[in-house]
Image: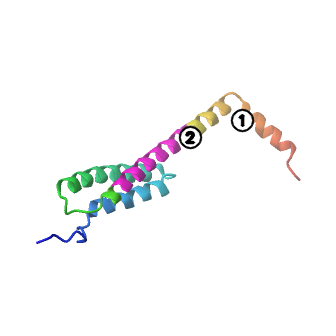
Amino acid sequence: MSENLNTPKASNGMATASLVLGIVSIVLSFFWVVGLICGVLAIILAIVSKGKIKADPNLGGSGAASGGLITGIIGVILSIIVVVVAVMFVGAFVDAATDGTFEEALRNLEQYEVE
């Protein structure tokens, strides 16, 4: 009795959820809190689902789990970059405000004001 090799494997919902959360984390990484949370959840779900897929050969979704892991990592990295850029921007703004550069720039803009 030969086993049918074309039998579809059962879908792993965690792998699919990981992929969806990873994509959401990339898309919403500009809102760094949402991107970071979704990215971390995507990474956790991908790791757990990969373990379950490895333990049960009848489960499918290995590609979705890998995609969720990759997109989750990318989403976390993009969210961290957004935070770093925002902190650098705020720091530059505070420096400009404290050393008088900001007021000088405002005075220069007043020259070009149309009446």
Q: Magenta stretch mostly in which secondary structure? A: helix
- Mark 1 residue type: Phe
Q: How many marks?
A: 2
Which quadrant holds residue 17?
bottom left
Asked if residue 52 lies in the magenta stretch, the reply is: no
Categorize mark 2 by other alpha carbons within 10 Å: few (<14), some (14-19), many (20+): few
Over which residues does the magenta segment extend? 66-87
Residue 28 in view (yes/no):
no
At mark 2, the secondary structure is helix
Which quadrant holds residue 53?
bottom left
Residue at 28% over, 60% down: 14
Q: Circle 2 sits on which residue?
A: 85
Q: Is residue 77 above or below residue 65?
A: above
Asked if residue 85 lies in the magenta stretch, the reply is: yes
Between the C-alphas of marks 1 and 2, the distance is 20 Å
Q: Is residue 32 left or right of residue 18?
A: right
Q: Position of residue 103 (x, y in %)?
A: 74, 35
Q: Circle 1 sits on which residue?
A: 102
At mark 1, the secondary structure is helix
Residue reaching furthest to the front: 1
